[in-house]
Image (cartoon, rainbow, N blue to C red):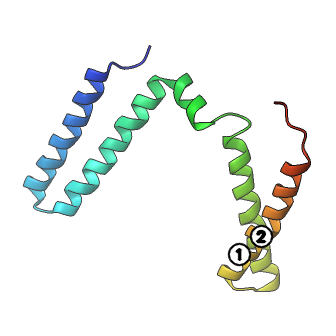
Amino acid sequence: MGLSFTTVQRMFIGSFLASLFVWYFQGAVMDAALTLVGLSTLTGIVWGLSEKDITFDALGVNAAGFLVVFSFLASIAIFAEICIGVFDWPTVGSYSLSLFFVGSFWWTGALIQPSNN
């Protein structure tokens, strides 16, 4: 059982009021906006974690979703940093090459895997 919707609404109203206080006391609209964004993000995370099963299923955060994306991005970054360090290639070119090179292996691997559907 997660948080009630009334509680989440009160948390969002509290975030809005806190950002108004920041704006009033600091006189900076940007600080107030960043406070509102940060507190609203925290409220959303808390709300999502209170309904963990529904949230994780909807986002695909499991061994077949989140870890695959993380390992794909990590392999791109590692390969690009090796190209930068060893061959002294430019950063943008290395990451572009790494995206296409590593991405082609991941795409080929995904195409030849049998599906469980």
Q: Do the residues labelled 1 and 2 touch (CB within 8 Å)?
A: yes
Most distant residue in the front direction: 117
Q: In the rendered structure, which amino acid carries the disc numbered 1? A: Ser
- Dot 1 corresponds to which residue? 96
In percent of the image, x 20 and y 35: which residue is there? Answer: 14
**Can you give x and y, in whole percent of width and height, for residue 13 in the image?**
19, 35
Quadrant of res 2 = top left
- As drawn, 31 above or below 113: below
Quick one: 74 or 109, which is closer to the camera?
109
Quadrant of res 8 = top left
Quick one: 72 or 31, which is closer to the camera?
72
- As drawn, 67 above or below 73: above
**Can you give x and y, in whole percent of width and height, for residue 11 in the image?**
26, 31
**Can you give x and y, in whole percent of width and height, for residue 113 in the image?**
90, 44
**Can you give x and y, in whole percent of width and height, for residue 39 in the image?**
30, 43
Q: Give the crowd class for mark 1: few <14, some 14-19, many >=20 residues within 10 Å.
A: few
Left or right: 100 in relation to 29? right
- Dot 2 corresponds to which residue? 100
Quick one: 33 or 87, which is closer to the camera?
33
